[in-house]
Image: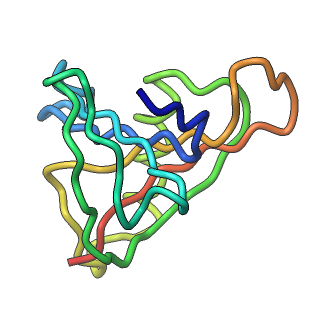
Amino acid sequence: GVGMGMTAPVSITAFPAEDGSLQQKVKVSLRIPSQFQANPPHPSDESIKIEERQEMTIYSTQFGGYAKEVDYVNYAAKLESALGSEAAYRKDFYFCNGYDPPMKPYGRRNEVWFVKE
């Protein structure tokens, strides 16, 4: 019964298929605002879970525009190419992040994150 408003980023955990496309399963995560961190409200919908994301180090790339799946896949490939074979990171998933509300037409910020191993 508590409204928390929009938070950023909206983070989608993407699971790449063998060909680089994204599998149909995804997990969408929203940051709980600071004032609710110590005692978050309990979700009334059973499909919504409260999870604590562990500290992580990431490799990241940023891009603008209204991001679509193809954009995240392309920027993930560019990030993978830029990192080369020397960087150790999780290959079974990555994060697709959007920071802006849908009604913001310009100056949009999106990121792809790879989690360092």
Which of the 4 quarters of the picture holds residue 65? top right
The mark tally for this picture is 0
Judging depth in this view, the residue of 50 and 35 nearest the camera is: 35
Horizontal arrangement in the rendering, residue 43 relative to residue 67 (left or right): left
- Residue 43 percent coordinates (x, y): 27, 32
Q: Residue placed farthest to the front in the image?
A: 1
The residue depicted at 50 percent of the width and 44 percent of the height is 97
Horizontal arrangement in the rendering, residue 103 relative to residue 76 (left or right): right
* Residue 66, placed above or below residue 100: above
Q: Residue placed farthest to the right in the image?
A: 106
- Residue 2 percent coordinates (x, y): 47, 33
The residue depicted at 12 percent of the width and 35 percent of the height is 18
Where is the N terminus found, in terms of image quarters? top left
Judging depth in this view, the residue of 9 and 91 nearest the camera is: 9
* Residue 33, placed above or below residue 116: above
Which coloring applies here? rainbow
Where is the C terminus found, in terms of image quarters? bottom left
